[in-house]
Amino acid sequence: ETGVTQTPRHLVMGMTNKKSLKCEQHLGHNAMYWYKQSAKKPLELMFVYNFKEQTENNSVPSRFSPECPNSSHLFLHLHTLQPEDSALYLCASSQDQQAQETQYFGPGTRLLVL
Amino acid sequence: KQEVTQIPAALSVPEGENLVLNCSFTDSAIYNLQWFRQDPGKGLTSLLLIQSSQREQTSGRLNASLDKSSGRSTLYIAASQPGDSATYLCAGPAREGGSEKLVFGKGMKLTVNP
C-alpha cells in the first residue's frame, strides 16, 4: 500500500462531459504531482504542487485544470477532452519537490474519451 | 535537455536467469537515478534510488549501478522469478525552466516464464 489513493480507477467520458479525478495522499508529503501515461510514450509530467502552490505546468492544455485545496488532496478537472487524451493518469507525492526525493504513486485512473 | 532511454522495450526470459536492465541518459550532470516497477493496471513502485556519490545500491535480489561518465545505469535482478514480471522504468532528474522534475524512460516490459 503506497498511501496514495486515486478515484475513480476507470472513467469513460464523452468529449462534451465534465469530470474530475481525485488523488489523496496519507503520507504527510508536501509535494503532489499529476502525470499522464500514454501507450508507447514515456511518463509525462503535467502539474506539480508544492505546499498547495502550483510550481509546474508542463504546457498542459487548458482543458485540464488542476486544483490543490490542501497538501493531502489533488484534483484534475476535465472538460471538453479529445480522444487523444485517453491515457492512464497517475498521481504521485513526495516529501518535497526535489528530484532526489522518492515519489510515491497512486494506482492511476484509466481514462477513455469517446 | 535530459533524455532517458531504455532498450530493449521488452524482454522474455525463463525463470532463474540473472538479468541486466539498461538505462541511458544524456545529461551527465545527473545526481541520482531511480528505478521503478509498474505492474499492469497499477501505479509505479519505487525500487531503488542511487545517488551519484554511490556506485551501487542493493535491495534484496536487486542491484542498481550508476556510471555518470558513460551515461548509464543498470538494474541487476538475480535469480529471476515469475513474480518479477512487470514493466521497469528508470528516471533521472532534470532542471528545466528553473524547476526540477523527473524524466522517465519508456520502460522495459519483463516477462519471466515459469
Image (cartoon, coloured by chain):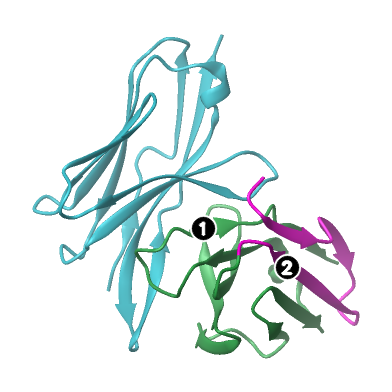
- Give the mark toward the camera: 2 or 1: 2
Q: The residue marked by circle 2 belongs to what chain?
A: A
**Chain B on-screen colour:** cyan
Report the residue at 20% width, 47% height from top: B72
Is circle 2 on the same chain as circle 1? yes
Q: Of callouts 2 and 1, which one flags the residue occurring earlier in the amino acid sequence?
A: 2
Q: Give the image location of residue B38, x and y in percent.
A: 56, 43
Range drawn in magenta: A1-27
Find numbered disc 2 in the image and state the secondary structure of the residue it sits on. strand
Q: Does residue B80 show up magenta in the picture?
A: no
Q: Give the image location of residue B102, x and y in percent.
A: 40, 66
- The residue carrying mark 1 is A41
> Which quarter of the picture shows residue A86?
bottom right
Q: Give the image location of residue B35, x and y in percent.
A: 40, 46
**Chain A on-screen colour:** green
Q: Amino acid at mark 2?
A: Cys
Residue A62 sits above or below residue B87 on the image? below
Residue A37 sits above or below residue B38 on the image? below
Report the residue at 52% width, 67% height from top: A44
Report the residue at 11% width, 50% height from top: B70
Residue A23, which numbered label?
2
Report the residue at 56% width, 89% height from top: A54
Q: Is residue B11 left or right of residue A63?
A: left
